[in-house]
Image (cartoon, grey):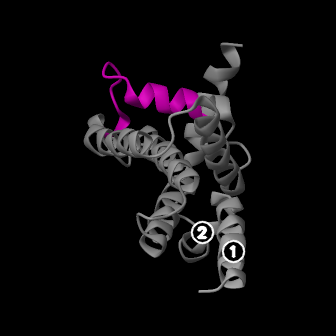
Amino acid sequence: MGFLDDLFLEEKQGKESEKRLLDCVEKVDVIQNPNSGVFANMMNDLGTYIDRVGPDEDKLRMMAYAYARRNAAAGLCAQGAWGQQEMDYQQNMFVSLQQTTGHTVEFQKQAAHQAFELMQSYDQRLSRALMSYIVTLMLSDSTKKAKDDGTFMTVDEVIELFSSIVESTK
């Protein structure tokens, strides 16, 4: 390769790394399965995304993917669609990606922000505080998951329940 080829390749790679997770995840499941709920739709779309890009994806987007996937898993767990085993698996994947991507606070903030942008594109009601609370609660060993007692909540019920709790703590 010549000098111009090298320059073009560097420019192309630079632009590719500027893309956010939101720019890369195609919202196919929302269209195909509109009644599945925001957390299931996001989880399925993230699965399709990672299958397409593979493990050599840009590190920042990989970490954003891990945040988004863990958040969606917590939502599914809060709904009662998933149990502790599924939540633990997503948390382990999150920690694994955290160890192989970037460890700086700024890097993690950027990744979390990209995940939040993606979540908000699915449902504007999914605030940072709300998702932080749901994730924390679903990772708590002392929390009895809805799935454990056979109940199931809709996405709207989860958002309403946890939003009122988050608001009461302010």
Look at the numbered disc 1 and give the secondary structure of its residue.
helix
Which picture quadrant has residue 111? top right
- Residue lying at 72% horizontally and 71% vertically, measured from the top left: 11
Which quadrant is home to the N terminus?
Answer: bottom right
Q: Main secondary structure of the magenta part?
A: helix
Look at the numbered disc 2 and give the secondary structure of its residue.
helix
Tell me which label, 1 or 2, sits earlier in the chain. 1
The spot of residue 129 in percent (x, y) is 65, 28
**Crowding at mark 2 (Cα within 10 Å: few <14, some 14-19, many 20+):** some
Q: Please say whether residue 139 is one of the residues in the magenta stretch.
A: yes
Residue identifier under label 1: 12
The residues tagged by marks 1 and 2 sit, at their Cα atoms, a distance apart of 30 Å
Q: Relative to residue 35, is residue 124 depicted above or below? A: above
The spot of residue 78 in percent (x, y) is 45, 38
- Residue lying at 66% horizontally and 42% vertically, measured from the top left: 110
Q: Do callouts 1 and 2 mark residues in contact (Cβ within 8 Å)?
A: no
Q: Over which residues does the magenta segment extend?
A: 131-147
Please identify the residue farthest to the top as the structure is shown.
Answer: 169
Please identify the residue farthest to the front as the structure is shown.
Answer: 3
The spot of residue 119 in percent (x, y) is 64, 50
Which picture quadrant has residue 141? top left
Q: Is residue 23 left or right of residue 32?
A: right
Which quadrant is home to the C terminus?
Answer: top right
Q: Is residue 142 left or right of residue 9?
A: left
Q: Amino acid at mark 2?
A: Val
Q: Relative to residue 46, is residue 105 depicted above or below? A: above
The spot of residue 32 in percent (x, y) is 55, 77
**Crowding at mark 1 (Cα within 10 Å: few <14, some 14-19, many 20+):** few
- Residue lying at 69% horizontally and 74% vertically, measured from the top left: 12
Q: Nearer the viewer, residue 109 or 27?
A: 109
Give the number of the disc on residue 162: none
Give the number of the disc on residue 30: 2
